[in-house]
Image (tube, grey):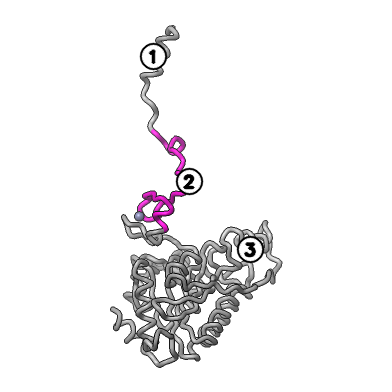
Amino acid sequence: MLSRSEAARQARERPLPAPGPRLRPAAPTGSVACKGCSRRFVLERYERALRVCPWCGHHGQVPAPARAAQLADAGTLVPVEMEVGDRDPLGFDDGRPYPSRVSEARQRTGLPEAFLIARAEIEGTPVVLACMDFGFLGGSLGSAAGELFTRGCELAAAEGRALVAVASSGGARMQEGIASLAQMARCTAGVSAVADAGLPYISILTDPCFGGVTASFAVQADIIVAEPGARIGFAGGRVIEQAAHEALPDGFQTAEFLLSHGMVDQVVDRRELRSLVGRLLQAMSGARGGTAAPVPFDAVEAVEAVR
Ligand SMILES: [Zn+2]
């Protein structure tokens, strides 16, 4: 039997167990991990880098208010407050009532719905910004979200502003059933109002962008740009493989794949996005004193002009 002092000496000399997941120190508060390379950053530094990883270039998701601030010229961003009310056409309850999920999303994001609508200027051109927030129930396109987007379009048409939309969505909002699907037509009508007024519309596709959003307003723009690596499609890849009974090509449903197949006009690093959108707007607006004047333009020429 060991003496007490001998047991204590052996305990001191025994190697410590290798750190496993349970022994790993908790991540410091205010830090964030890159989803591309798993490196950790101080949140403030990551925000300053526009949520683009300086090591691997991964583009992280951006909440709508931060996105609008990234795109707008300093001091020009004015969110448009719109009442949306409470909607629950099906009385949906999947163990938790739908209205409760909406109110929790409102508290978490500070937004009334999955869209932030704002007046702003981009490189001097007046615009209406319509930014989706994936944090609001997966950026799903419910009837209130569709109404916000459409009212944003009408605002752009009424005030002679260009429309710039940032899409980030999982698709339709299943809790609203057919009412959600109807938003594709409603948003399309909004886009038509902008087009009828002869105003430019630029759509920015960000990760992820799926379902009814990709099937409607996100791809109805004069110019469609996408962020690097963004996953963009209608149905998910696994669903398509099961339905088509064939393997999908590498990189299917990425921004780069869509660019090479003509569905996207340009893939743009987020750090270059504001400048590019500004130049596109000026090219499309005829640069008439910084206003988005309703003049005819050629989207292909505009993209070529700023390349
Ligand atoms: Zn990274």
Prevailing secondary structure class for the magenta stretch in the rendered image: loop
Q: Looking at the image, is 71 positioned above or below residue 155?
A: above
Q: Looking at the image, is 71 positioned above or below residue 200?
A: above
Instruction: Tell me the CA gap for discs 1 and 3.
Output: 60 Å
Tell me residue 28's x, y (percent). Answer: 45, 44
Does residue 151 appear to the left or right of 69 in the view shown? right
So how many labels did they put on this image? 3
Q: Which residue is mark 1?
A: 9
Circle nearer the N terminus (2, 3): 2
Tell me residue 38's x, y (percent). Answer: 38, 50
Q: Which mark is residue 102?
A: 3
**Near-viewer residue (223 or 156):** 156
SS state under label 3: helix
Q: What amino acid is labelled 3 in the image?
A: Val
Disc 1: residue Cβ within 8 A of ligand 1's nearest atom: no
Q: Which residue is mark 2?
A: 29
Instruction: Tell me the CA gap for discs 2 and 3.
Output: 27 Å
Tell me residue 19's x, y (percent). Answer: 40, 34
| Magenta run includes residue 207 | no
In the picture, the quarter occupied by the C terminus is bottom left
Q: Nearer the viewer, mark 2 or mark 3?
A: 2
**Near-viewer residue (7 or 254):** 7
| Magenta run includes residue 32 | yes
Q: What amino acid is labelled 2 in the image?
A: Thr
Q: What amino acid is labelled 1 in the image?
A: Arg
The answer to whether any part of residue 241 appears in the image is no
* Boundaries of the magenta span: 19-47
Dot 2 surroundings within 10 Å: few (below 14), some, or many (20 or more)?
few
